[in-house]
Image (tube, grey):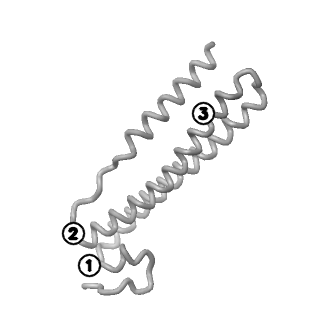
Amino acid sequence: MQHEESGGRWPTSVYGVGDEPDPRFSLANERTFLAWIRTGLAFVTAGLGVAALAHFAPATGSRFIIAGVVMLSCGVLCGFTGFTRWARNERAMRLGTPLTRPSVLPMLSVILLLIAGLAAFSLLS
């Protein structure tokens, strides 16, 4: 069934085009979006925790602050990426075009590995 209007759903740039996809695919896309949000919240929580450690280690506090800011930034990036990926994939399913590729995942993985390596190095020295 072709939808010319979004039916009051937001964003209209997603829901105002193409055909309604199989609900299973839309729900799977939504679960993926929620996983991105959950990951972003974990980054934010970890970033706040690491930054709080700066108060207990004044000599190396700046390292904790930097690591916390990086992790908070990753959390914000996860939230933004989750929404944009959800919207692009939902629109692609409605238009019958290929889904987007996960371009941010490798960068987030490298950042997380670097932070874990720095944390391990700090603990050992």
Report which residue position mark 3 lands on.
Answer: 67
The secondary structure type at the circle numbered 1 is: loop
Report which residue position mark 2 lands on.
Answer: 96
**Image vertical order of residue 92 relative to residue 40, above or below:** below
**Residue in the picture at 47% in, 35% down:** 111
Name the front one of labels 1 and 3.
3
**Residue in the picture at 34% in, 80% down:** 16
The secondary structure type at the circle numbered 3 is: helix
Report which residue position mark 1 lands on.
Answer: 19
Q: Of the residues shown, which amino acid type is indicated by label 2? A: Gly
Q: Nearer the viewer, residue 20 or 73?
A: 73
* Mark with earlier residue (1, 2): 1
Q: Of the residues shown, which amino acid type is indicated by label 1? A: Asp
Q: Are marks 3 and 2 in contact (CB under 8 Å)?
A: no
Q: Of the residues shown, which amino acid type is indicated by label 3? A: Ala
Residue 107 locus on image (x, y percent)? 41, 39
Number of numbered discs visible in the structure rendering = 3
Name the front one of labels 3 and 2.
3
Q: In terms of image quadrants, where is residue 90?
A: bottom left
Residue 21 locus on image (x, y percent)? 29, 73
